[in-house]
Image (spheres, helix red, strand yellow):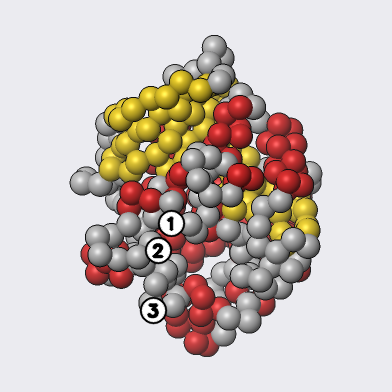
Amino acid sequence: MMDLSRARNLAEWPAGRSAIEKTVLSTLGPMPKSRVELQTKTADEVQCAGYVRRRVNYFVDECERVSAWLFVPEEKEEIPAILCCHQKVPQGKDEPAGLEGEPVLALAQHYAELGYVTLAPDCITAGDRVSSGLDPFDTKQFYHDNPKKSALGKMLSDHIYAIDMLSEVKHVDSARIGVIGHGLGGRNALLLAAFDERVQVCVASCGFTRFAADTDPSRWVEDNGFAQMPLLRDAVKKGKFPFDWEHILAMAAPSPTLLITALNDELLPDGKSCQKALKLANNIYNLLGAQDALDIQTHNDGHRMTADSLQWADEWLERWI
């Protein structure tokens, strides 16, 4: 694995990035070898003040449709779009849509009110995608059907389809697409920015703690409930990881990426490790001439998105798209 602290030669980066991508994918599991047509359908539509909210669904593989909320501001042309990834809540997409959950995390509604097209889809095991007879975020059925994949890998694949979906929306400027998320949503936002070059800007709140600094790395591979990356199990046992979150950040370069981190995060301890990840990844951003495109804001309000966090996100997105 490429040592980012020693990155000095831009000519070496393409090969280094390719090696990182291969390593990360070996943990996320295989991505789909072929793409399916979205065949987007609108289930219902509600007129709101300044925008239309639509319940849509589209294919993400040969037999599965994803349900999502699509917000489209009225009377605007060539506008930027933002994919809003939900956190680990049973209601999934309904929280960023502002229908239930934390008001500060009604991100799809918030950014639609600011003039962006927004999309908030359900992840597997949440919202309309909870497996029959199981609790939300119980991945047992997913791994029964997909033993060689990972939940985070599937979420990444589905979010790539979400970018396809946004790119097809009338009036969207497909060259100005961003992603934002908190918690699990922040994790998914970072992975998407790393793997989909169409993502021009990313905001990730409380998305990770470095594997190497994690006091409980088994959280990533747990056998029961929500198993995010079971293919990382051997690495957890050995305490030696094939990659860390700075490599994900480096893969996203030079796309502008803002980390928002709680220094007292009760769910993802050692928030300072995020600062270390940023410092290491920043070597790649510097090589690519994007010195100002990777930043971090910290707070002491625990694992939550605050009013200040939202303001930082607003300013970052306005600045870059």
- Residue located 53% across and 49% down the image: 101
Could one spot residue 190 in this view of the protein? no
The reply to whether discs 1 and 2 touch (Cβ–Cβ < 8 Å) is: yes
Crowd tier of the residue under label 2, counting other residues whose Cα lies within 10 Å: few below 14, some 14–19, many 20 or above? many
Instruction: Indicate which disc, 3 or 1, sits on the residue closer to the N terminus.
Output: 1
Quarter of the image with the C terminus in it: top right
Q: Position of residue 264 (x, y in %)?
A: 74, 69
Judge depth for marks 3 and 1 and give the one in front: 1
Crowd tier of the residue under label 3, counting other residues whose Cα lies within 10 Å: few below 14, some 14–19, many 20 or above? some
- Residue located 71% across and 31% down the image: 318
- Residue located 24% across and 69% down the image: 144
Residue 76, label in figure: none
The residue wearing badge 2 is 137
Q: Position of residue 139 (x, y in %)?
A: 35, 67
The residue wearing badge 1 is 90
Q: Position of residue 308 (x, y in %)?
A: 76, 47
Q: Position of residue 155 (x, y in %)?
A: 42, 54
- Residue located 24% across and 60% down the image: 132
Crowd tier of the residue under label 1, counting other residues whose Cα lies within 10 Å: few below 14, some 14–19, many 20 or above? many
